[in-house]
Amino acid sequence: MDWRGLRALAFAGIGRPEKFFATLRGLGAEIVAARSFADHATYDARVLARLRSEATAAGAQLVTTEKDAVRLPPAFRREVLVLPVRLEIEDWTALDAVLAALGLAGFAAGESRRASAADDGFD
């Protein structure tokens, strides 16, 4: 999704919500309001109504994290955009070295665990 220019009311109940907000800004979203909740927050009907109302008044789209989205009621989840976050490792050298030291050489380099399991005869 192209986040550039999206007016967003971002909300998150994660350990460091400011990182989520910074990621959205870095992708070009215009955060008109950022709401932080406690890690693992439970979103009750009153909180969800307030978020919806604030977003509507600001002409903004609700946006949250994948972790928060799974805690939303399905009907409300349909109103919220979810920012997927994926780890991308540019240089696998250090990870490969640690895995090799643990006797797990090749896992980070792309060998599948399934291939290893097949070698063990546990198919």
Image: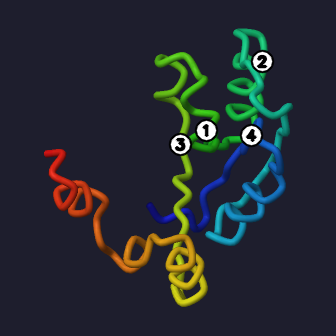
Q: For the residue labelled by badge 4, is the local secondary structure a helix, a strand or a loop?
A: strand
Q: Please identify, in this view, whether the residue under mark 2 or under mark 4 is nearer the observer.
A: 4
What residue sits right under mark 4 in the picture? Answer: 12
Mark-to-mark CA distance, 4 and 3: 12 Å
Which of the pair 28/59 is nearer the observer? 28
Other residues around mark 2 within 10 Å, as few (<14) / some (14–19) / many (≥20): few
Sequence-earlier tag: 1 or 4: 4
Q: Does label 3 or label 2 sit earlier along the sequence? A: 2
Judge depth for marks 1 and 4 and give the one in front.
Answer: 1
Query: Decide: marks 4, 3 in contact (CB < 8 A)?
Result: no
Residue occupying the point 15% across, 51% down: 121
Q: What type is the residue that disc 4 sits on?
A: Ala
Q: Quadrant of the N terminus?
A: bottom left
Instruction: Say which residue label 2 marks.
Output: 47
The image quadrant that residue 118 belongs to is bottom left
Q: Give the quadrant of the C terminus.
A: top left
Which residue is located at x 33 percent, y 75 percent? 110
**Disc 2 residue type (three-letter):** Val
Residue behind mark 1: 67
- Tell me the residue at 52%/30% (across/down): 79
Task: Residue 94: name its quadrant.
Answer: bottom right
**Element type at mark 1:** helix
Q: Residues within 10 Å of mark 4 (few under 14, many from 20)?
A: many
Q: Residues within 10 Å of mark 1 (few under 14, many from 20)?
A: some
Q: Which residue is mark 3?
A: 81
Horizontal placement of 49 versus 119: left or right? right
- Whole-percent x, y for residue 105 in the image: 42, 77
> Tag 3, which secondary structure?
strand
